[in-house]
Amino acid sequence: MATIKGEMMHHIAPRCTISLHNAPFMSSNLHIPKKCQYCGNAFVARTTVTKYCGCKCAKYAYKARKRAEKVQATLKEEMQPEVAIPSSTTAINQKDFLSITEASQLIGVSRWTIQRMIKRGQLKAVPFGRKHIVARYQIESLFN
């Protein structure tokens, strides 16, 4: 309650001027004939952005869209040019002593193959700190 110059007045809440059933912004009054973008069947849409006739078509369309995106990503990957050989291979070609990783890159095998060859005695590696070093002439002698 509010008082104005000693008089007592009752507070009256303002009435809502918009009726929910006749509101122009509500989409529930809309009936738009459309064609489903997935199955092609005709249906009546209740909103302006509806594309599919139901949840089932919406889910199928979503899965098809995601599948197509994966295919496009794969095709885009395959179309990319091959990665150029890094300049570190030219540095490897100039070294007389190589680490196991560098020796594997030089021959084109995995480093585990080089380690097996060392274990079998086909290559001689010298421990150098935490690494093992292989002489370049030993790798070249494998092919002679």
Image: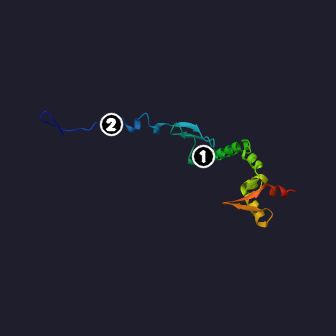
Label 1 sits on what residue type? Answer: Tyr
Does 79 sit left or right of 20 as displayed? right
Q: Give x and y (percent) for residue 138.
A: 81, 58
Q: Give x and y (percent) for residue 67.
A: 65, 47
Q: How is the image coloured?
A: rainbow
Q: Secondary structure at mark 1?
A: helix
- Give the vertical position of 89 relative to 111 (above or below): above
Tell which of 66 and 36 is nearer to you.
66
Does 42 sit left or right of 13 as displayed? right
- At label 2, counting other C-alpha atoms closer than 10 Å, the crowd grade (few under 14, some 14-19, many 20 or more) is few
Q: Give x and y (percent) for residue 33.
A: 56, 36
Name the outermost residue toward the left. Answer: 6
Q: Give x and y (percent) for residue 103.
A: 75, 55
Residue 62 is marked as: 1
Tell which of 108 and 119 is nearer to you.
119
Does 86 sit left or right of 21 as displayed? right
Indicate the quadrant containing the N terminus: top left, top right, bottom left or bottom right: top left
Tell which of 49 and 142 is nearer to you.
142
Residue 16 is marked as: 2
- Give the vertical position of 35 relative to 98 (above or below): above
Q: Please give the name of the residue rendered at 51% of the width and 38% of the height, measured from the top-left corner.
A: 47
Q: Please give the name of the residue rendered at 73% of the width and 42% of the height, measured from the top-left corner.
A: 79
Name the outermost residue toward the right. Answer: 144
Does 2 sit left or right of 133 as displayed? left
User: In which quarter of the view is residue 78 placed?
Assistant: top right
